[in-house]
């Protein structure tokens, strides 16, 4: 693979209802359980919009999973509760951007993940000057950010693959799971975003984290196929990188990666 490429950070978040925020905003009875508070919010939302998908500012980040491709390394990890609270999860994510200035890659990051990170980061007092640099920052290369920054929709420092492939038309967007499987990658394994709250209440935090990490890897693999299509990778470079990814995942030797690799082979 072209080792002159800039660091690439693929990311995905998983969220749960911000129960504490809902209690505060609606002055709810303290005797209500977290599940009851969330269900009230879902019911109110369904009445308004016919969906129980909560507004983005009321989604608490439980997990951010990342895949960092830098130099000769591929690292996959999660920032997650209960090891870190939400404020630390968000701050550490932005600290990674501060450290590496990577191209960040997502699937619907512009429509969901990044706005949630903005609202929740604001609530927690998170600091992220590199991420918010629009060309007027104090960095040596800040001027470059005027024409290619993380915020502007049509720039590539943040590449929202879903948005770009759909030509920025929401009606044209495709689900990651289906597209990954059509290409020949594993796709989702057993869980999806709609099941996260139930899994969280059941104490299955590790399962949420594992699911989020496999989502990130599906996104990275689709990103590689996109780079092949764009001509950024030759067919040989693409094949070499795909083999490298498989070898790195085999080294991790964890159940969710074994399942992922088995699905890839099937």
Image (cartoon, grey):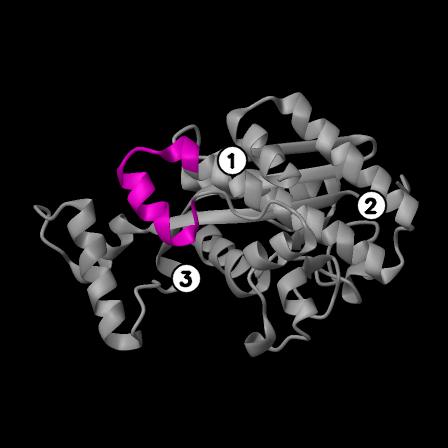
Q: Which of marks 1 and 2 is nearer the N terminus?
A: 2
User: Closer to the camera, 121 or 82?
Assistant: 82
Query: Measured along the vertical axis of the image, is residue 146 above or below residue 257?
Result: below
Looking at marks 1 and 3 on the same chain, the residue that comes earlier in the sequence is marked by: 3
In magenta, the rendered stretch is 191-207
Residue located beneath label 2 in the image: 6
Q: Is the magenta stretch mostly helix, strand or loop?
A: helix
Residue at 9% x, 52% y is: 29
Q: Nearer the viewer, residue 45 or 204?
A: 204
Q: In this view, does 192 lie above or below 110?
A: above
**Name of the residue lying farthest toward the front:** 266
Q: Pointer 3: what residue?
A: 56
| Membership of 104 in magenta stretch | no
Residue 84 visible here: yes
Q: How many tags in the picture?
A: 3
Query: Cα distance, mark 3 to mark 2?
Result: 31 Å
């Amino acid at each position: 693979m072209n080792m002159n490429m800039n660091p690439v950070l693929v990311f995905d978040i998983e969220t749960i209802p911000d129960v504490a925020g809902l209690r505060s905003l609606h002055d709810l009875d303290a005797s209500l359980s977290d599940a009851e508070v969330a269900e009230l919010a879902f019911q109110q939302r369904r009445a308004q919009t016919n969906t129980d998908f909560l507004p983005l500012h009321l989604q608490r980040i439980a997990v951010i999973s990342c895949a960092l491709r830098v130099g000769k390394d591929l690292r996959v990890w999660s920032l997650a509760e209960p090891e870190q609270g939400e404020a630390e999860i968000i701050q550490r994510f932005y600290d990674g951007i501060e450290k590496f200035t990577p191209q960040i890659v997502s699937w619907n990051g512009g429509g969901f993940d990044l706005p949630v990170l903005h609202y929740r980061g604001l609530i927690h007092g998170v600091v992220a000057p590199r991420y918010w640099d629009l060309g007027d920052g104090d960095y040596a290369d800040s001027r470059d950010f005027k024409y290619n920054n993380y915020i502007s929709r049509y720039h590539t420092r943040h590449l929202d693959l879903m948005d770009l492939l759909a030509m920025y038309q929401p009606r044209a967007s495709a689900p990651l799971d289906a597209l990954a499987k059509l290409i020949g990658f594993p796709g989702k394994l057993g869980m999806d975003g709609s099941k996260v709250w139930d899994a969280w209440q059941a104490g299955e935090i590790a399962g949420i984290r594992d699911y989020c990490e496999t989502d990130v890897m599906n996104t990275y693999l689709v990103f590689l196929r996109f780079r092949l299509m764009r001509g950024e990778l030759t067919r040989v470079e693409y094949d070499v990188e795909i083999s490298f990814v498989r070898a790195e995942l085999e080294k991790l030797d964890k159940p969710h990666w074994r399942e992922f690799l088995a699905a890839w082979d099937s």
